[in-house]
Image (cartoon, rainbow, N blue to C red):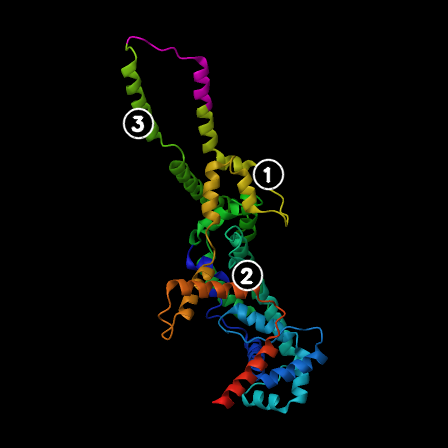
Amino acid sequence: MDAHSMCCPYFIFSGARWHKKVDKAVEIVRWAVKWIRQSPSRIHKFTEFAKVANPSTTKHLNRDVPTICNSTYHMLEIAQAYEKTFDRYDFEEFDFRYEIEKACLSIPSSSDWERVRNVCHFLKPFHDVTLRIFGTLYVTSNTCIEDIYSIRTLLDDAISDSSLCDIALAMKLKFDKYFGDIEKMNLLLYFALILDPRNKVKYLVILLEDCYGEMGVEAKKKYIMDFMYELYNDYIRIHSPSSTSSTVESTTSSLILKKHQNSDFMAPNPPLRNKLREKMKTNIVESIGELEKYLQESVEDDSEMFSILDWWKVNSPRFPILSLMERDVFAIPVSTVASESVFSTSGRVLDPFRSSLTPKIVESLICTQDWIQGSISDTIDYEKDWEENQQIDKELGKVK
């Protein structure tokens, strides 16, 4: 997979800018969240105000990394739910207004919050796509093309929105650079789409028509299928019995037999043996036609209980060669983020002050960290823990 296919939701944001008013609203909320999160006492006051103004909201404010769209989405999505709390905080805490005006900004207005909600609505599909393609416990390659096409539709719709037009146009230019034409894309993504028994070529045609119109769809479909058949034929050549080895084996067998039989004696050719040879030839033809057979069958129903891996496991005896191709295609991760994060984690475990750890200890630390993170409950009160840690730091400071 090329790098662009593996991180589509992220890289098309780089260099893109929001509309001036939208950018201002996002910056105001970002500053407000950052200012409150900088102090445990401010967090405590905000939490108390939230219990009155927004009693149904229990999520905690998060700061974002401006260059990562998912981070910005989480920050804005949580912050917009606390609109009333921010108003109450402004009314009760004079320092809040003073500091925000000192930063040449203003208290978030109702129009600012409306723009923020519009941004959240725009970013949510990117957030959802990112979660899907970053998954490691399920197949991701079979849905990537559908996600790419949905992003294209989203950008086309956003261009007609005056508040999103600027960033949508900038993103569309970069999107088209890498995904505008089929020739620019990694065709393995299309192969994975087709090898999903819920899609096959029928769904491919629907996606192509929706994206490019009916004109030229057949040519694009042929372009994809020609390469898919080429890959499939390579699998036949590699995994089917080699004709060369068969010829060598048969020649060797004939020479051995000739040593033990009279050259003047002609062995009979039983009719049943001829039937066996015909049946073997038929089996070879069926093996070559696996892809055609798969494509001609009806698509499977798309239900929540459907498992693409289980389907291929059950049907692999019917498609022995094609199932090998399917395993290799579905095994390709659309994103390398999960695997790369494992290696970057080792950099946080081993540093100049801990450079003498044995490989076994490093492995134990990394595995333990992963197990702990996987078992952490979402109900942990981070604010309470933060305040307790701050108090511990103060007490330790007194000891010094």
Q: Are marks 2 and 3 in contact (CB under 8 Å)?
A: no
Q: Is residue 125 left or right of residue 262?
A: right
Name the residue beneath numbered marker 3. Answer: 248
Per the model, the C-alpha gap separating discs 1 and 3 is 41 Å
Q: Select label 1 or label 3 by which is in front.
A: 3
Name the residue beneath numbered marker 1. Answer: 298
Per the model, the C-alpha gap separating discs 2 and 3 is 53 Å
Magenta run includes residue 350: no
Q: Amino acid at mark 1?
A: Ser
- Of residues 261 and 118, which is closer to you in this image? 261
Name the residue beneath numbered marker 2. Answer: 131
Q: Residue at x 50, y 43 (%)?
A: 218
Q: Position of residue 41 (x, y in %)?
A: 60, 86
Q: Is residue 222 left or right of residue 210?
A: left
Residue 205 in view (yes/no) = no
Relative to 93, residue 217 above or below: above
Q: Amino acid at mark 2?
A: Leu
